[in-house]
Image: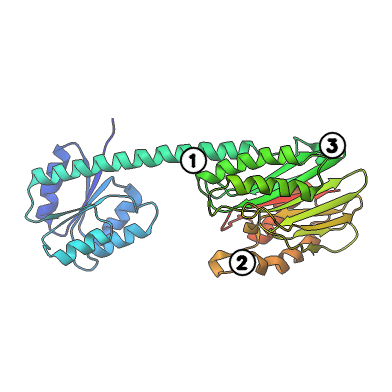
Amino acid sequence: MQNFNVLIVDDDSVNLKLLDAALSNAGYRVVAASDGPQARLIVSEWRPDLILLDIMMPGEDGFEVIQRLKEKPYTANIPVIFLTAVDKVEDKVTAFGLGAVDYIIKPFHIREVLSRVRLHLKLSIATNSLIANQAEKLRQIQSAQISMLTVPEDFPDANFGVYYLSLQEAGGDFYDVLKISDSIFGYFVGDISGHDIATSYITAALKALLKQNCVPVYEPTESLKMINNVLTDVLPEGKYLTATYARLNRKTKMMTIINGGHPPVVYLPRDGDARMINLQGDVLGIFNDIHLGHEDIKVSEGDRFYLYSDGLIEDPGDGKVWTGGLDRLLSVFGKLKNIPIGDSVQELTELILGETSQAEDDVVVLGIEV
C-alpha cells in the first residue's frame, strides 16, 4: 500500500476543513497548516508528496513559502499547486516562475482540485521514476569506471598508494598503473574535460590505449604521442585530456616524467626537501603535433613522487585555479616522510582539503615510492 501525503496551507479554516475532508475521502493522508512558517516546518519533518498553497496569507505569503522550499535540495522537487483567490496574470506568471506546477482560482470546485492533485501526483511519480532509473544507470557507469582502476594489491612491486574521489557518476579523473616489465612500471594520471556519459567511455578507451602503447619498445614520450594521435581521431569535439606519465625503472633507478598540460609532479627525495617538477606540455586529444614536457631523474631508494589531479589544489568557489595552490601543496610534504606511502596519499588529501575531503572537483592522488 502506497500512501500519498498532501499538505494544505491556507489561513482560511473553512477551506482547510473542506479540502481536508475531500482529500481524506479520496484516500490521501492530509496535514494542514495555517501559515508559511508552520508549513515549512511540516515539510521539513513530513515531506509531503504534494502541496496545496494559498498566496494571500498574513506575514509570509505563498510566494515566499515556495521560494524558500525551492532553495533547499530536499524540498525543491515537491510539486506545489497554488490555490488562491488572486486572479491576476502577473501573479500567475510569478507563481510558475517560482516553480509551481499549477494554479487554481478560488472559489474552487472539489472535483477539479482532486483531478489536478491526481494529475500532478502521476507526473511526479513518472518524473521520480525516470530520475531514479537514470541515476541507477549512472551508478552502474561509475561502478564500471571504478572497476577499471588498479589498486596496490594488483601490483605490490609497484609500491604505490592512491586516493580516488569521483564527485559525479561519470568522473573525469583517471589513473592507471602498468607493469611494463619485471623492473619497469608506468604510472599515469589524467583529467578528461567534462563529467558526462561520454567521459566514462573515454576512460575505458584510455585504459586500453595505455596498455597497448606503454610497452618496453617505446620511450615514454613516444607512448603518449601515439595515444594522443588516436585521441585526436576519436574524442568528441571540445573534449581533451591533461596527463602526467611517470615511468620508473627500479633496476637502473631512473624515473622519467612526461607532462601534457597537467599540474606538476612533486618529487620528495628521501634525504631532501620536496620540489615541483615543472614541465611545460600540450594537452592531449586536440592536435596531432604536440610538445610534451620531459625530465629524467636519477633516484635513490626511498625517494617518492606524487602525481595528482587539479581537483586537489584548485578552489573554484574562490575563483582560484590550480596554479594558485602549488605553494600550499608543497609546504605539507615535510609531514609525510615518515608515513607509509599507502597512507600518505590519504594524509596529503586531508591536509589540503580537510578531514572531510570536501573537494569541488574529482580528485586523484597517486604516490610512488622507489
Can residue 124 be seen here? Answer: yes
The residue closer to the viewer here, 136 or 78, is: 136
Tell me the number on the disc at residue 72.
none
Image position, residue 5 (x, y; %): 26, 43
Res 127 → quadrant: top left
Report the residue at 54% width, 66% height from top: 317
Q: Are marks 3 and 1 in contact (CB under 8 Å)?
A: no
Residue on which disc 3 sits? 181
Tell me the CA gap for discs 3 and 1. Answer: 36 Å
Q: Is mark 3 on a helix, strand or loop?
A: loop
Q: Is mark 1 on a helix, strand or loop?
A: helix
Q: Which amino acid does label 2 sit on?
A: Val
Residue on which disc 2 sits? 321
Image position, residue 185 (x, y; %): 81, 42
Q: What element carries label 2?
A: loop
Tell me the number on the disc at residue 138.
1
Res 282 → quadrant: bottom right
